[in-house]
Amino acid sequence: MEQSGITWVVAADGAQARIFEERIRAGEVVERKAEAMAQKGGDYPHAAGSGATVHERAGPRRHGADERAPRQEAEDRFLVRLADQLGKDAQAGAFDELVILAPPRALGALRSALPKAAARRLTGSSPVECVHEDAAAIRQRLRQTRAEH
């Protein structure tokens, strides 16, 4: 028996995301290049005015007190932007099921930022680094993720 319905597989990390689509369960997986996303300049924080500076005990290094690294902040902003877009796509009916494949930190950030429309369609996730893999490898990861759930 063939199950139909569109499944989107999001392969992401903190810097980019690629969307793959499966139209028939256990069928072919193809990349949706138009939906790919990457960090952009607006994801990086603007330079802070004057914040407290902490001097390291060992060595001449300094860093801001209670400030997050710009790279981490850019990743978080990108992941929130990705989650918002997935929410809009879910409301538009672009997919029926959603599977997220991302490293643990990015996976947690994405899951917590997903709007309800997308979160309701989330049927699986896996903490893996696979954003650079091809469609055949993503298909295998999708099968593994479904087997685990």
Image (spheres, grey):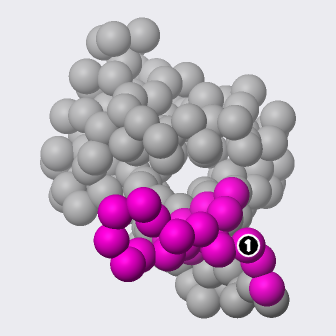
* Front in this rendered view, residue 104 or 18: 104
Q: Is residue 77 above or below residue 137?
A: below
Where is residue 60 shown, x and y percent of the image?
A: 38, 78
Density class for disc 1 (Cα within 10 Å; few <14, some 14-19, many ≥20) is few
Where is residue 91 shown, x and y percent of the image?
A: 82, 48
| Residue projecting furthest to the front | 57
Q: Would residue 86 be found to the left or right of residue 126 on screen?
A: right
Quarter of the view holding residue 139: top left
Quarter of the view holding residue 23: top left
Instruction: Give the total number of marks visible in the rendering.
Output: 1
Q: Which residues are magenta?
A: 50-71
- Residue beneath disc 1: 52
Where is residue 70 shown, x and y percent of the image?
A: 56, 73
| Residue 16 shows up from this direction | yes
As helix, strand or loop, the secondary structure at mark 1 comes to loop
User: Magenta span has 64?
Assistant: yes
Q: Is residue 28 above or below residue 146?
A: below
Q: Would residue 136 be found to the left or right of residue 30 on screen?
A: left
| Residue 17 shows up from this direction | no
Where is residue 31 shown, x and y percent of the image?
A: 36, 61
Q: Name the kind of residue labelled 1 in the image.
A: Ala
Q: Residue at (72%, 44%) from the top-left corner?
A: 113
Most prominent secondary structure in the magenta stretch?
loop
Q: Residue at (52%, 70%) from the top-left corner?
A: 55
Q: Residue at (74%, 27%) from the top-left corner?
A: 120
Q: Is residue 121 above or below residue 107?
A: above
User: Magenta span has 35?
Assistant: no
* Front in this rendered view, residue 68 or 107: 68
Q: Residue at (39%, 51%) from the top-left corner?
A: 11
Quarter of the view holding residue 144: top left
* Front in this rendered view, residue 81 or 134: 81
* Front in this rendered view, residue 104 or 33: 104
